[in-house]
Image (spheres, rainbow, N blue to C red):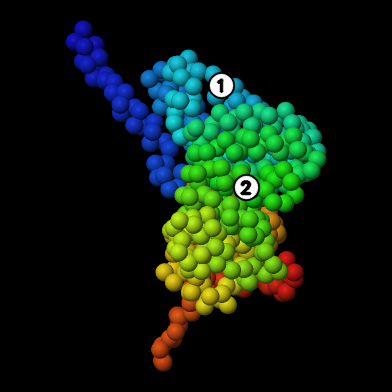
Amino acid sequence: MEAKHTVSSIITRLPIEIILLIVESLVPQNDATRPILPALHPITKTLLSLTRVSKAIYPTACKLIWQNCLYLDTKSKLRKFRRYISKKSPITGRLPCDAYGSARLYLNPLRYKFDTASTYDTISPSTCRASRRSGRYPMQDLRTIYILEDVLITLAPVLKTLIVDMPLRDIDPWEDVIILKSLRQGFEALVNVEELISVKDELYLGESAIGQYQVFTKWPKLRRLCLYNVMMEEQLWKDMASCPQLESAVFIRPDPSDDDLSNDDIKGEWARAWATANPRDTKRDGLVYEGPKMAIAFCNWPPYLPDFNSMIPHWQEVDPDNKISVLNVATHARYDRKARKRGPIASCQDWVRDHSLLGTIWSEVERKGQPVTPPIVFEEGQVEEDDDEWVDDDDGADWTDDDDDSW
């Protein structure tokens, strides 16, 4: 009897508060670099298993899944997710949007069978796709479009970060009016979104060929914007200026308003657009920028990055306090043969997708961005240090093919 009593007295139970702290520690706590995890990720699997352990752990595990694992990359996941968000939990008695708070979403339910592959196998979309045929043009699936609209409208009160990775440019603005109308209604409802990343396009949802505002103009809380291959035209700056909280814009492989992006008056365009949108706060009609700080980054392969040096004297007049930061960001090293093999479109889309899913897109732009600034004037006898970032680290490599047109 004494031995039994001794053994039973040694067995203790952890307080539920400590157990919940252990569960929460599974997910990275750094808000600046929080990834969105797919279903097959070990952390997602662990959290899903924990929902089945006890009623006490269920709400915390579900909340962590809600905040970190909303990764919709198939039609079936989209359908199941709509059913999930439309029903009250038998444990909490509440709808997920009410119970678990803010959410971040990766959206790619409509895609081609062989889509752009990612270099981050544990985080991003796999090269292995479902074998079931889903039609030649995924964006023509009207049934799934309606489901997507319903999901977006339901998430509107809580969605903070949105990564869109769908072939929206497949939609014809003249023929696919019903599809575009449904998508615009869904996206325009997202009034609480603070961060938007569009991997494949500029979030192309125009119901006519030209002259329609971007859906993000309906999002008053938008702070960060990342668009792929957008046209750097006057309407873009007007749309951006209509977002009062916007502080950062990242453009991947943008198209110039004229023949050469290097000739685009980036600071002047933004200053004029901001002055037009804020006439009460403007005294000089946009001739001198009077708005808040703004970061504008251009991301591309190294040889295709714009050279804004000729614009610097003019920009010093437009923005004497340097409130507008213009950055150039190289998505890949100059001698990255893997990127060259993939081509500029696929490799740049991989880059923005991977960093967005890892939660590092904004910090990567800030870390690698080369600001466009006036040239440094050296005093006599002073030598500039060589900090060229395009160093060929392939010692002894054969670069006889370096004159081809792949760059």
Label 2 sits on residue:
214
Element type where label 2 sits in the image: loop
The residue drawn where x is 45% and y is 80% is 376
Q: Please state which of residues 2 and 74 is positioned toward the viewer in this rendering.
A: 74
Report the Cα–Cα distance between label 1 and label 2: 29 Å
Q: Judge the density around disc 1: few (<14), some (14-19), many (≥20) Cα neighbours within 10 Å.
A: some
Could you tell me if residue 42 is visible in this image? no
Mark nearer the N terminus (1 vs 2): 1
Q: Give the vertical position of 248 relative to 17 (above or below).
A: below
Along the viewing direction, whichever of 139 and 178 lies nearer the viewer? 178
Q: Position of residue 87 (x, y in %)?
A: 54, 19
Residue at figure coordinates x 28%, y 23% from the top left: 15
Q: Which quadrant would residue 164 be assigned to in this image?
A: top right
Residue 63 drawn at (x, y percent): 44, 29
The answer to which quarter of the image holds residue 215 is: top right
> What amino acid is labelled 2 in the image?
Gln
> Can you tell which mark lies on residue 86?
1
Image point (43%, 38%), residue name: 27
